[in-house]
Structure formats: C-alpha cells, structure tokens
Amino acid sequence: YGVPRVCLGQDKVPAETVASPSFAMRVVAAVLTHAIQSEAIEDQIAKFAPVLQKMCADEDAQVLALFEAQKACLEAGEGKAEPVFSALYESATVTESALNAWQSSTRKGYGSKTKIIMQLSSFLSRLRSAPVEINGDA
C-alpha cells in the first residue's frame, strides 16, 4: 500500500485524527512499507522523517512504531531490519530509550522479535558502544 496522502501534505486531516495512535501507526506502517519496497530505505525514511517524528512524538508512540518496523521487516525478509531501525534512530524518529523499551517489551502480535534482534545485533552493539552525549557534546 502506498504512502498516505497526508504524508505528502495533500490532505487536510483533522487534528483529533492525527492525534489518534491508530492513525499514527497506520501512517508509520505505510511509510515503512514504502521505504522497504523502494530499496532506498534510509533515503525514504529521511524524506518522511518530519511526518514520522510527528507521529512518534512520545516514547510510547516510538515503541509502537518500532513494533510496526519489526512487523514490516519480518514481512519483507532478511536484510531489512538494520537499515530500517538504523534510519529510524538516525532520523531522530526514535530514541535509544525507546529502542531499549521495545527490546524489553513483551507485547505480542508483531511476529518474532528474536529474529529482528538477531538481525540488529551489530546496530545495537554500535549503539551501546557509542559515546554518551552530554550537553550536545560527544
């Protein structure tokens, strides 16, 4: 399915609809599916980062978006998880805290998290070993 027209600024969506978690996750799922199908995953996630950031304004929404990413990556097959999760993090759509919350969550219904975590091992390792920023300095 394609990217919702709201992502492209072509529709006027009432604020209460945009604020709905189910609407937000439908948008996130559509953007992720589009990005994965385009084969330019990082570029597409960067392109839609302002929309994704708006849909994932708090940590709970970010964790739900990571579950949507998990599901989309499992459906797409091997090799998609690292570029998707890395791009979500690099685009400031999700935080390290949200990634940690997603990893420790027991939420069901999104497929095998273990498979995705295995595919993300080098990304998660790099994230853990990165210097901690204090006041914007590395």
Image: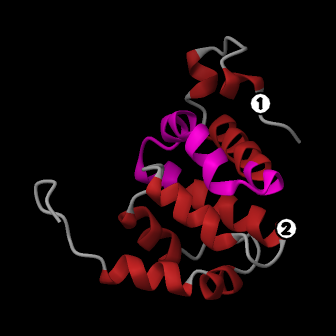
Q: Quadrant of residue 40?
A: bottom right
In the displayed structure, 41 sits above or below 47; it is below
Q: Nearer the viewer, residue 30 or 19?
A: 30
**Looking at the image, which residue is at 59% across and 61% down?**
66
Residue furthest to the top: 12
Q: Quadrant of the N terminus?
A: top right
**Looking at the picture, how far across and down is residue 30, in whole percent?**
76, 43
Q: Which of 106 and 42 is in front in this view?
A: 42
Residue furthest to the left: 135
Q: Bin the neighbour count of mark 1 within 10 Å (Cα to Cα): few under 14, some 14-19, many 20 and up.
A: some
Side of 89 where 84 appears, left or right: right
Residue type at the position of mark 1: Pro
**Looking at the picture, how far across and down is residue 50, in whole percent?**
51, 34
**Looking at the image, which residue is at 66% across and 16% down?**
13
Look at mark 2 in the image and give the residue it sits on. 75
Residue type at the position of mark 2: Glu
What number is the disc on residue 4? 1
Q: Which of 138 and 88 is in front in this view?
A: 138
What number is the disc on residue 47? none
**Looking at the picture, how far across and down is residue 89, in whole percent?**
47, 59
Magenta part of the protein: which range?
Answer: 35-62
- Residue 45 lies in the magenta stretch: yes
**Looking at the image, which residue is at 83% across and 74% down?**
77
